[in-house]
Amino acid sequence: MNWIDNSIDSHARLLALRSARSEAISSNIANSATPGYQARDVDIGREFSSYLNQSGPNIQKTQPGHMEISGAGSFDLMYRIPQKVSENGNTVEPETELSAFTENAIHYQAGLQFLSSKINGLRLALKGE
């Protein structure tokens, strides 16, 4: 990895985690009336901490033309522990999901703005300004 990748890689990973969480929450909301559906979520703190502590994938390149592996698409979905379970076994709590979705969207937007300013700073540094 070069120095540019090192400076923005963790921010990109965090945005990917936020995106995965948005998908999980959206799925929960869409299935709020599905009997037996179990609400899922991504534990961003645990996933990001695991990412920061990893020493890299155990896969080695066997040919010079092989691409690097980042592991950006693997996230563990966990089941939410509900406050109440509906009569049909569904564990989705719409108020909780909407709150989590809004909070995640705010964090995602802030992350995009931070990453954008980081890239602009790198661009200025490369231009020598």
Image (cartoon, helix red, strand yellow):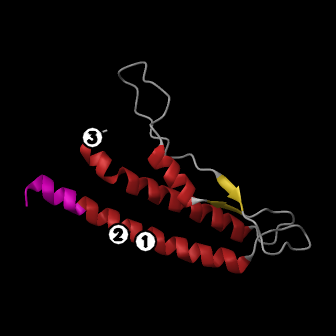
* Furthest-right residue in this view: 87
Q: CA distance from mark 1 to mark 3?
A: 26 Å
| Element type where label 2 sits in the image | helix
- Give the crowd class for mark 2: few <14, some 14-19, many >=20 residues within 10 Å: few
User: In terms of image quadrants, where is residue 60?
Assistant: top left
- Give the crowd class for mark 1: few <14, some 14-19, many >=20 residues within 10 Å: few
What's the residue at 55%, 53% (across, down)?
47
Asked whether disc 1 touches disc 3, contact meaning CB atoms under 8 Å apart, the reply is: no
Asked whether disc 2 touches disc 1, contact meaning CB atoms under 8 Å apart, the reply is: yes
- Give the crowd class for mark 3: few <14, some 14-19, many >=20 residues within 10 Å: few
* Furthest-top residue in this view: 62
Amino acid type of the residue that numbered disc 1 sits on in the rendered structure: Gln
| Element type where label 1 sits in the image | helix
Mark 1 and mark 3 lie on one chain; the one further toward the N terminus is 3
What's the residue at 57%, 46% (across, down)?
74
Amino acid type of the residue that numbered disc 2 sits on in the rendered structure: Gln
What's the residue at 54%, 59% (across, down)?
45
Mark 3 and mark 2 lie on one chain; the one further toward the N terminus is 3
The x and y percentages for residue 112 are 38, 66
Left or right of 2 in this view: 106 = right
Residue 21 magenta: no
Residue receiving disc 1: 109
Residue receiving disc 3: 2
Residue 124 magenta: yes
Q: CA distance from mark 2 to mark 1?
A: 6 Å
Q: Which residues make up the magenta segment? A: 120-129
